[in-house]
Image: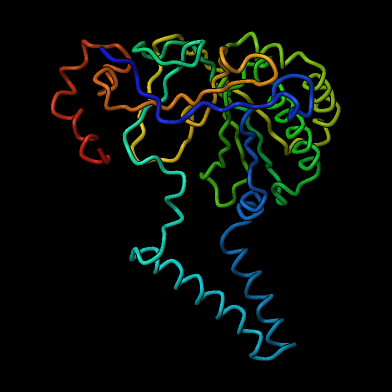
Amino acid sequence: MSAFKPLLPPFNVPRETASAPGTVHPRRVQPSISVVFRDSLTLSTWLLLGGLLQGLAVLFLGTYALLPTILLLLYRTTDHLLMATNITRNRYMDGVIQTKFSAQAPASDGSFSTEIASESIVVFHLGARSNHPLGVFAPGMAELNRRGEEMYREMYDNPVNYGLLGTSSWVKQDDPAGNETMMIFYLRDYDALHRFAHDKLHVETMKWWSDIVKDHPHIAIYHETYIVPKGRWENIYVNAKLTGIGDTWFPVGGKGDGDVSRFVRPIVDAKHPSLRSAARRLAMMQLEEREKGTDSLYDKSYIS
């Protein structure tokens, strides 16, 4: 049986681009500040603030103050209607891989075999929440964010040492305001994560936390660790942007040794027979009979 077909080329990172000793990660995820700011207040609060500012503008500038709002709304409506009717390019499709694909671990030389979920991985959730009327603007939150950014930067500057494959950031949607955020880390092994947890930067942050937690009871922090054995993880994506473990990079050897670090995306074509169903992707063939007649439904939705 033929090997999995990679859908994206390898990526070479010059070592001198690293801002710290080690090998810089090909892509450092930078959470959007505008999204964090937007989600810190409820929709009704934003509408009230917008109404107040518009009212003040009309009070001082007259009805001409409505022109910028009208023109901007007209522009955005026209822009999106043109995209929706396929007259102009749909920018929301940028980065979408228009096929059925799966994330699989490459071999040490960057190639792919037919072995499914060929490496064990660690999934680490790190979250924080503000239980305060000011949300993310509450006392202590700015410093917590700054220290969190330092730790993320340290991991991205030394991905091989700390086993980092990639991250995804999320905002909890259970409340009217998004005052709880979480970062999901995908790592190669727990030893590397443990190494980071006991390195200088994280230890200093925990000392800072222990000093301020009594006076800042509104700040919550938490983590969850899941060690997933080899062959016990699976995934499938159809017409999707890279996300989750699909948005990771695996460091590999071979051609990139020396002054350049070589990383490979785990994305492979899921039309391969071994990746056709969840039962096959988990090597649980005893369950395949239950999937009979449904495993082909995905096939109708991707572009051949």
Asked whether the viewer can see residue 188, the reply is: no
Kindly identify the residue that appears in the image at 25 percent across and 24 percent down. Answer: 276
Q: List the single residue furthest toward the bottom.
A: 62
User: Does residue 79 lie above or below 98 as drawn?
Assistant: below
User: Does residue 28 lie above or below 198 as drawn?
Assistant: below
Kindly identify the residue that appears in the image at 59 percent across and 47 percent down. Answer: 178
In this view, the residue in front, 159 or 295, is 159
In this view, the residue in front, 133 or 304, is 304
Q: Tell whether 57 sits left or right of 185.
A: right
User: Does residue 239 lie above or below 228 as drawn?
Assistant: below
Question: Looking at the rendering, in which quadrant would you find the C terminus?
Answer: top left
Give the image location of residue 185, x and y in percent: 58, 25
Give the image location of residue 300, x and y in percent: 20, 39
Q: Tell whether 272 sits left or right of 183.
A: left
Asked whether the viewer can see residue 205, the reply is: yes
Where residue 14 sits, quadrant-wise, is top right
Give the image location of residue 296, x and y in percent: 18, 31
Kindly identify the residue that appears in the image at 72 percent across and 36 percent down. Answer: 219
Where residue 57 sits, quadrant-wise, is bottom right
